[in-house]
Image (cartoon, rainbow, N blue to C red):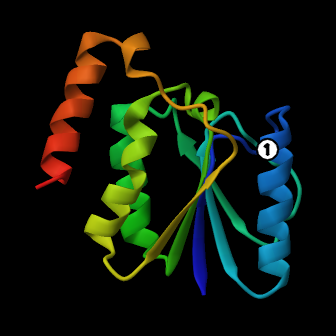
Amino acid sequence: MKLLVITGAFPSMPAGEADHMFHLCRRLAEHGLEVHVVTTRSNKVNVALPFKVYPIIRNWSWPDLLRLARLLKRLSPDAVLLKYIGWIYNDHPMITFAATVSKSLMRSAVFVTQFANAEGAPPEKKSFVTRLIRNVIARKASH
């Protein structure tokens, strides 16, 4: 089974969420899953791992949604696990569309969101352009 893990928190980020995802991915790989992790560019792991890490996301904003979509299409995983807590994605609403993009590209893939807590990406704190793009994508996704 091929699994893609999406997480903004991964080593070398000094956060409990980063350690959690690192150990989860390592254990899943040790149990025979083919694990791939997409994370933030600044997260660099400098040790040998039993899974593949793609530190390709700049800041979890709208252009990064295209990077994520290209990776999803290229890897074509059987399942996707999103570790969600707003602050590890810079409180940007882009990440909330990961499931929609995943399902539009791979209908049969399972998508699971693991919530760390109820903190979200408050739209009122974002720019007008970000809110506009979010609303357009949300409307398109609901049709």
Q: Secondary structure at mark 1?
A: helix
Residue lying farthest to the front in this orientation: 118
* Residue occupying the point 75% across, 45% down: 10
Q: Disc 1 marks which amino acid?
A: Ala
Q: Is disc 1 surrounded by few (<14), some (14 to 19) or many (20+) residues within 10 Å?
A: many
**Height in image: 52 above or below 90?**
below
Q: Is residue 49 left or right of residue 98?
A: right
Q: Residue at x 86, y 48 (%)?
A: 19
Residue 41 horizontal side relative to residue 103, left or right: right
* Residue 102 position in % (x across, y down): 37, 63
- Location of residue 54 in the rendering, given as x and y in whole percent from the top left corner: 60, 54
Instruction: Answer above or below: position of 61 versus 103.
Output: above
Residue displayed at 82% across by 85% down: 31
Count all numbered tags in the image, as a single digit.
1
Q: Residue 107 at what x, y percent from top left? A: 31, 77
Residue holding disc 1: 18
Q: Quadrant of residue 103?
A: bottom left
In percent of width and height, residue 88 lies at 64, 33
| Quadrant the N terminus occupies | bottom right
